[in-house]
Amino acid sequence: MDATAPILIFDSGVGGLTVLAEIRKLLPNAPLIYAADLAGLPYGEKSEAEIAARVAGLLGRMSERFRPRLITIACNTASTIALGMVREVLEVPIVGTVPAIKPAALQTQSGVVGLLGTSATIRQKYVDDLEANFAGGKVLLRHACPALVSAAEQKLRGEVPEPAVFRAAAQGLRGQPRGEEIDTVVLACTHFPLVEDELRAALGPGVEFIHGAEGIARRVAHLTQDNEFHREKPDFAVVTGPIDAAAGLDLAFREYGLEAVAQF
Ligand code: DGL
């Protein structure tokens, strides 16, 4: 294994930075490349076929270009739809990001768990299976909030998202039967931890948020435990589509240790 081989972290936009941050904590010496498919954002409003073809195609081309030792799909939408297929077509190990329903079900005291995700994620059989296998006897209330994806993208560009977006997300959960009993919310989209403070304020006290980033980082660390790492140049980001789309993101990328942005 080439010690300079990077770990590639992939998302449709800036959401995967929440996963990158946890990977960096555990593997500070690992060379990282962050890939944002800005030309495909938002995945949550696309069809399953479109997402699967896009993610498999892009990751294939990125693997050829960057020769990663491991790929993290830091996107619940892409993972719940395309993880199996991507694993079949690529030889590189792939770690996915899927809704943290299991820890939420173990943690809830009221027995009522909320789940916020994209429209595409919340309708997946993958999520039905996680609910059936790990949340038996609990109530799982799902709500799709694509507007939170845009809000997180805006926030990382230094803009202030419309507060009504967070109130609407909270109401989407609270307004369902037994919604007032929710004490645990699964953030089933990697963008959403970026607006956790705003969501906390909208949902009110007594709600715990759970997302998968720490668990994913532990999995990545485990799979690379015997690897040597050597960073020969600073970590960087690549974006699809016109580079202008990433113009406002330089500062955020630098805060996450990504020193340059290039077009893929
Ligand atoms: N960050 C992605 C996720 O975890 C989705 C955002 C999008 O809709 O593209 O689901």
Image (cartoon, rainbow, N blue to C red):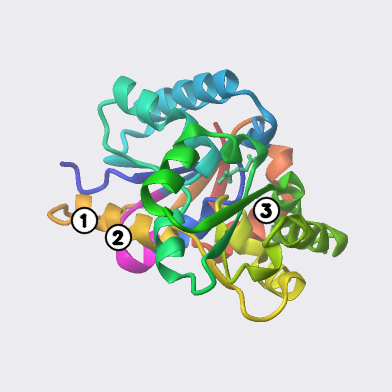
* Residue found 48% across the figure and 39% down from its top: 128
For the question of whether residue 99 can be seen, the reply is yes
Q: In the rendered view, does 230 fall on the left or right side of 210?
A: left
Q: In which image quadrant can residue 90 be found?
A: top left
Q: Where is residue 120 in the image (x, y as percent from the top left)?
A: 62, 34
Q: In the rendered view, does 68 fall on the left or right side of 37?
A: left
> Which kind of residue does numbered mark 2 sit on?
Arg
Tags 3 and 2 in contact by the CB under 8 Å rule? Answer: no
> Which kind of residue does numbered mark 3 sit on?
Leu
Quadrant location, the C terminus: top right
Q: Name the residue under label 3.
A: 249
Q: Mark 2 points at which residue?
A: 218
- Label 3 packing within 10 angstroms: few (<14), some (14-19), many (20+): some
| Magenta highlight range | 23-32
* Residue found 57% across the figure and 39% down from its top: 121
Tags 2 and 1 in contact by the CB under 8 Å rule? Answer: yes
> Which kind of residue does numbered mark 1 sit on?
His
Q: What is the distance, in whole Å, between disc 3 and disc 1 at their CAs?
A: 31 Å
Q: Where is residue 193 in the image (x, y as percent from the top left)?
A: 59, 62
| Above/below status of 34 relative to 40 | below
> The residue tagged with tag 1: helix, strand or loop?
helix
> The residue tagged with tag 2: helix, strand or loop?
helix
Q: Name the residue under label 1.
A: 222
- Compare residues 202 and 88 and report the one nearer the observer: 202
* Residue found 70% across the figure and 68% down from its top: 180
Quadrant location, the N terminus: top left
Q: Nearer the viewer, mark 3 or mark 2?
A: 2
Q: In the rendered view, does 177 fall on the left or right side of 82?
A: right
> The residue tagged with tag 3: helix, strand or loop?
helix
Q: Where is residue 122 in the image (x, y as percent from the top left)?
A: 59, 41
Q: In which quarter of the image is ligand 1?
A: top right
Q: What is the distance, in whole Å, between disc 2 and disc 1 at their CAs?
A: 6 Å
